[in-house]
Structure formats: C-alpha cells, structure tokens
Image (cartoon, helix red, strand yellow):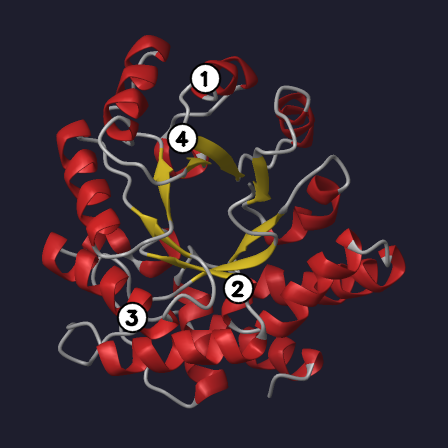
Amino acid sequence: MTIFKGSGVALITPMNADGSVNYDELKALTQWHIDEGTDAIIACGTTGETSTLVDEEHLKVIETVVKQVDGRIPVIAGTGSNDTKHGIYLAVEAEKRGADALLIVTPYYNKATKTSLVKHYEAICSQVELPVILYSVASRTGLNLTPDLVKELIKIPNIKGIKEASGDISQIVAIACLVNDDFALYSGNDDQVLPILSVGGSGVISTIGNIAPKDTSKMVHHYLDGEFEAAKKIQLAQYPLIEAIFSEVNPVPVKKAVGLLKGIETHYRLPLGDPEEATIALLKEKMTNYGLL
C-alpha cells in the first residue's frame, strides 16, 4: 500500500531568536497544512534544517508533529545519518514516537560503496517495522542512488518508496521500470512533479508546499484523476515561484517565504543565515504575482 498519494510537505522548522525550536509555531504550521489539504507531512527533512538539530530536538519535532496531526494524515520522519548506528537510533525512536514512515537519505560525506550502502539500509530496516522511503539527492550527499542500487535496495522488505531528487529524468524512468505499483515514486523537485507522475509517480515531497500547500496537493490529484490540463496549469504557474525559493540554498528562501506569508519572524542556525535583500525582494515579487501576498 502506498504511504501517501499527493503532496507531502517537507516542513520547515520554525525557530526563536535565540535559535531554539519554536514548538508552538510548529504545531500551528502543522495544523495549517492539514487545513490546506496537504496529504502528508515530512518532519526533519533537509528543509527542516535537521543537520543542526541535536537528537533531543530532532525527536521532539517529530513527536510534536505526530501529536498535532493525531492520525489525520501520515507523518514521515527524516532519520537519515552518515553513521549507521546513529541512523538506527533515530529510526527506532521515531517509530516509538508514532511516525508512520521514515525518510532515509543516503549517507553523506563518507559516502559508501554499493555493498556497504545496502548493508547500511538493511541494518536500519531490520530494527523497525515502519515503511521506509529512500532519499536520493546527490547534490547534497555526493551519493547517487542509481537504478542498479535501487534494484538491490528494493529487495529489503520495508523499503516502499523513493524521494528522487537527482533531477535526471532518464534515471527516474529507469527506476520506474524496476518497481511495482506498491512502490511509491515521489518527486523530490518541485519543477518535475508532472514528468514523474507521467511514469507512475505517486506525488511529491515538496518544498513549495510550505507556502502553496493547497495548490500543490490539487496539482497532483488533478493529474491522478486524469485532469491533465488543470494539473499542467498549476505546475507552470508555480515555476517562477519555485525558481525564487531555490535562488539561494534550501531552506533559506522558503523559510523566509513562510515568514512573509504567515507574518512570523524567521530565524536560522548557522551555517545558514538570513537571505540576501535581493532574494527577499524576489520572493515578495513572485509571491505577489502568484497571489500569496
């Protein structure tokens, strides 16, 4: 059974001026996404600045989202690590806290050979019962999940999907040829949702969903319901806004965009910091043009 179909938002992690996590705002944003029709929430993904969260915060963010969602939509917990033992710990603890699935990025920096990568995922998956979504984003990790690797990894029983953010449509098509209807292929790039849906994708794990959740979900469901022109209209309309939210490294612009949209202060943890003034001006322009401001 597919974990979700539609738009899963890779949720930002709101923070206070002192750098602590703003859990009240996290709950408010989670509720807003439910009200706006988001189909799943990804807590502690890349967009959530997870690499700067200590384990206690990481797990509390997941738990806070799970409690706020209260079973209404799936909560997918990001638990990837470049240390297998640490990845096991995060996965087990996320399962205890009620996550519905796990998003596990490939090991970063130290990378891995094909053999050791398979062992890495086998070790984590053997310790949990939750379905696992692979996360392939070589631009961040330096490690690409090629079709040959995916072919081996999908033999692990609880690997049930992939967030594909390589940007390589040919690779994505090759992966689509390897999997069955029970395996979920999610776009990891907001500008490639419809191409991936066209080869059997189930939806998107979205960044733009942080500020346009209703439209992003509608776009996917229009396509899945055969309303291709309606879906295309949204995909093309979102493109200038997508360019704006990726004009600096993610999640810097989109977190600022959430602040502009919701009227809240935005704070980051170093090494991330405030966007350039030109980026803020671009965000305001594109958000206004899209009808968000």
In the orientation shown, which residue stands out farthest toward the top? 115
- Which numbered mark, 2 or 3, is in the foreground of this view? 3
**N-terminal-most mark, 1 or 3:** 3
Q: Residues within 10 Å of mark 4 (few under 14, many from 20)?
A: some
* Horizontal side of residue 179 vs 263, given as left or right: right
Q: Residue at x 40, y 65 (%)?
A: 71
Q: Label 1, secondary structure: give it.
A: loop
**N-terminal-most mark, 4 or 2:** 4
Q: Label 3, secondary structure: give it.
A: helix
* Horizontal side of residue 278 vs 17, given as left or right: right
Q: Amino acid at mark 1?
A: Lys
What's the mark number on residue 158?
Answer: 4
- Alpha-carbon distance for marks 2 and 3? 29 Å
* Horizontal side of residue 201 vs 282, given as left or right: right
**N-terminal-most mark, 2 or 1:** 1
Say which quadrant the C terminus sits in.
bottom right
Q: Residue at x 20, y 72 (%)?
A: 21
Q: Is residue 120 above or below residue 133?
A: above
Whether residues under marks 2 and 1 lie with C-beta atoms below 8 angstroms apart, the answer is: no
- Which numbered mark, 2 or 1, is in the foreground of this view? 1
- Alpha-carbon distance for marks 4 and 2? 33 Å
Q: Residue 5 in the image: x percent, y percent? A: 61, 52
Q: Amino acid at mark 3?
A: Lys
Q: Residue at x 58, y 48 (%)?
A: 189
Q: Amino acid at mark 2?
A: Ile
**N-terminal-most mark, 2 or 3:** 3
Q: Label 4, secondary structure: give it.
A: loop
Q: Give the residue number, with chain letter if any, for mark 2.
A: 245
Q: Is residue 176 above or below residue 15?
A: above
- Alpha-carbon distance for marks 1 and 4? 9 Å
Q: Give the residue number, with chain letter if any, for mark 3.
A: 67
- Which numbered mark, 4 or 2, is in the foreground of this view? 4
